Amino acid sequence: MKVMVARLRGNSVQLELEDAPEPAVGPTDLLVAVRAVALNRVDLLGTPYRFGHSPADAGPAAGIEMAGEIVEMGEEVVGFRLNERVAAMAVASMAQLVKVDYRLALRLPHEMPWEAAAALPVGHLTAHDALTSNGAMQPGASVLVRGAGSGVGLAAMQIARLKGAGLVIGTSRNPDRRARLAELGFDKVLDDHRGRIADEVLALTEGRGADVILDMVGGPVLEDNFRAAALGARVVSIGRLAGGRCAIDLDQLALRRLKLFGVTFRSRNIEEHATVVSRFVADLMGEIEVGRLVPVVDRVVPFAEADRALARMRANEHLGKIVLTL
């Protein structure tokens, strides 16, 4: 079969089409004929991304999320059938065939387009886990999303609104993007420069601060997040686009009685990952089935033009998910 492999060429990553053996299907695996794959920033690293439970034979392909049809199943699989449409977070997903444990798969509505389905798993599973399991968002809460134009940021906005948030605030440095984010559903979109966001959030919340803060930026904005937080707020670190190290004002952490969480799938075992999926399915799959929860797709690019898609992500020109179709 054909797979897309990320190779470091000079100072940048290129995606190259190669031949690879078909995955060996284990007893709890689904073998999926891939129809679409969504890009993620980990695809810019040039090394295969692995979850905490990734099998040793995951293969060389890039990619961590896809959608397609089941063509083979292990003998211990329950609840799925051949030819069923599914989406999942799965390593080595930029390939014609991908295996994934059935407990990690999302059963798709028949009418859901492949490009939207491929854009669903990473952003929406991460956002739901961060917002509900870690952020413990309650109806009426104010939510601040730092780095709102990412797939996770947009998913968080959608989920927060569906779960009854009182105010959903996003941030972005790009003025055109800020306008588009407001159109997509954020109540307010702020210019993301260090030192200003906290004052603006406090003004928007009448001095109270945000109840839940989801941070895709990291680095120097963490201290500002603390100042923007309400008493007892939860701050969830998801991404580190601005860096992985920063100073922490422990006085703010203590005085505001904040709870700081970190989330990633890189250290989750299969049972922990499956729990995230099952919670999402129970809470939000009905919203997907009736079309109230739809991933934001920036653009769709043929599989053979993957490098063009990767260049768009590298330049940070996208809003939402970039999807490759096979």
Image: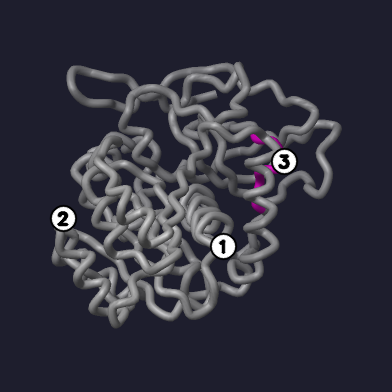
Q: Determine which of the numbered discs, if any, sits on residue 112 in the image.
A: 1
Q: Which residues are magenta?
A: 100-106
Residue density around tag 3, few if under 14, some if 14–19, many if 20 or more, within 10 Å: many
Residue 149 shows in this picture? no
Question: Is 101 contained in the magenta span?
Answer: yes
Q: Residue 141: percent from the left, percent from the top?
A: 46, 75
The local secondary structure at tag 2 comes to loop
Residue type at mark 2 is: Arg
Please identify the quarter of the rendering in which residue 286 is found.
bottom right
Query: Does residue 134 lie above or below 187 as drawn?
Result: above
The local secondary structure at tag 1 comes to loop
Report if the CB atoms under discs 2 and 1 are less than 8 Å apart.
no
Residue drawn at point x = 61 percent, y = 38 percent: 33
Residue type at mark 1 is: Met
> Which quadrant of the rendered structure holds the N terminus?
top right
Query: Does residue 176 lie above or below 161 as drawn?
Result: above
235 to the left or right of 317: right
Q: Residue 261: percent from the left, percent from the top?
A: 47, 48
Q: Nearer the viewer, mark 3 or mark 1?
A: 3
The local secondary structure at tag 3 comes to helix
